[in-house]
Image: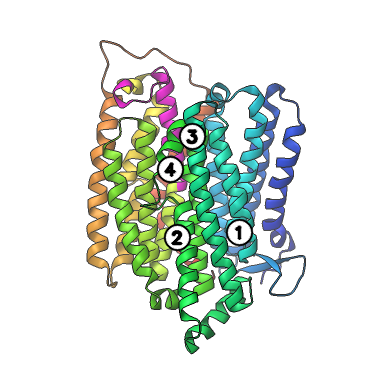
Amino acid sequence: MIDNMVAFNIPFVSIFMLMIAAIITPLLPRKKRIPEKLSCLVIFIVAILSAYLLYALTSSGQDISFNFPMGHFPAPWGNELRAGPLEAVLSLVFCVAMLLSLTGNFSSTAEDIPASRRQIFSVLVNLLTASLLALTYTNDLFTAYVFIEINTIAACAIVAVKEGPATTRAALRYLIMSLVGSGLVMIAICLLYDLTGHLLMQNMHGAIQVLMITREYAMPLTVSLGLVTTGLAIKSALYPFAAWLPDAHGTSTNASSAILSGLVLKGHVFTIIKIFYRVFGLEVIHALRMDTVIFILGVAAMIMGSVHALKQNNIKRMIAWSSVAQIGYIFLGVGLNTVAGIAAACLHIIVHACVKPMLFTAAGGLSNAAGHKKELHALMGTFYVNRWAGMGLIAGACSMMGIPAFAGFASKLSLTLASFDNKFIVWALAALATSSVLNALYYVPAVIVILTHNKNNPPKPAPVTKLYKFSMFVFLMINFYLGLFCVPLLRLITRGVNVL
């Protein structure tokens, strides 16, 4: 338990501030883009609070976590938040990545979204951030489901906020797939509540352990685990449930693409990790063979996501399919069903949450330099027009390929080390090697294109704002920090997993 009352209230205050900001934003005047600036300010404040919470939880050197009851109702109806080192660091990373995604695409948002819709965009950003933090901190499945739905509606709307028939079709497809996933999760929660009589995760865990010992209701328990896993896998864009993702990214704004790929998907992935680890337990997951299923799907996503990316000529669709492959890395770590595997998966969540928004922001800058064209051949020579975007794409590509000193190398190395002493070691190492080679086959040509001078039709110089340069600089520094100093972070994550 934590004695610091300020830190004790931070999880609830963070979510509450973002929800209040979502209510206030539509009431503000549109001039000088005040609603968007308010959203950035609130997210910045929440990031500071998350950093303080992380310090309060780790400064003593002990593994500390605490529960925050909401409403003080007893089980099974009580709603709780739970915070430990892992939740605090994820909250901090999500807020920083969200803030940089907004500031890095501040000027492009003004071009892509009509002035009448920018207030709505700010509302959606606040709701998405609130839902991400709620999914990170929640300790009961009812609260988790409520914010899964808020996340779904806001994520689909953030795609549709850009006008156009293609965008509308992509948003509707996204909505339909997300609702299917939400329905499966709701059925699973109902089954688990009926079987255990609890909604709080610790209480539910104890009841499930008893059911496994007595072998009572083994089939309904297996079905509930399968339903919740499938539902959240759909929402996480795990292959083969990822067909909606490239269209959503390819037609939405640059900021929306960065937020969806880098952040929204991670909220659902971390929810799966918490349900596996905190509700069922690793032993139950192994007994029901769900670790094998998740591992196989993770390997399939790593390979097939990259295969689809190889076929793309649109840079945003290519990066979107790359996200499918990277989600596979996370599920591979979860499928190892060990503390080391889950810690490596969480490290890759952090890496992907920081690198993928940088890639989409860089792709947006290069596309603007090419006259808003997204085809790879049209980006020839754009590095020399927007060097910050070019450096972002190159650094992001090196990270996704696992080049040493870049963020992706750290998480891939952690996944490799976690695979040892595991029955899946051969398949894991083969998948990691194959996927890295495939990553190089589509990222290297993209890098070569932007570095190749276009003598026949050179791109015209385009202004690059100071805010864009600053955001890309911070993205690059985070990328190198994660690549060079990942050991302390991995230790911190492991501590967080131990008290998860």
Residue 82: image tag: none
The residue nearer to you, when weighing 146 against 118, is 146
Q: Is residue 73 above or below residue 136?
A: below
**Overall secondary structure of the magenta section:** helix
225 horizontally vs 382: left or right: right
Q: Which x, y percent locates residue 215?
A: 47, 86
For the record, the magenta segment spans 353-378
> Which numbered disc flags the more N-terminal residue, 1 or 3?
1
Res 332 → quadrant: bottom left
Residue at x 24%, y 60% (from the top left corner) = 429
Give how far across and how far down residue 157 sits, in percent: 58, 38
* Direction from residue 486 to residue 398 in the image, left or right: left
Q: CA distance from mark 1 to mark 4?
A: 21 Å
Number of other residues with Cα within 10 Å of mark 1, as a class: few under 14, some 14 to 19, many 20 or more: some
Q: Please give the label number shown on residue 244.
A: 4
* Residue at the top extreme of this rendering: 456
Residue 145, disc = 1
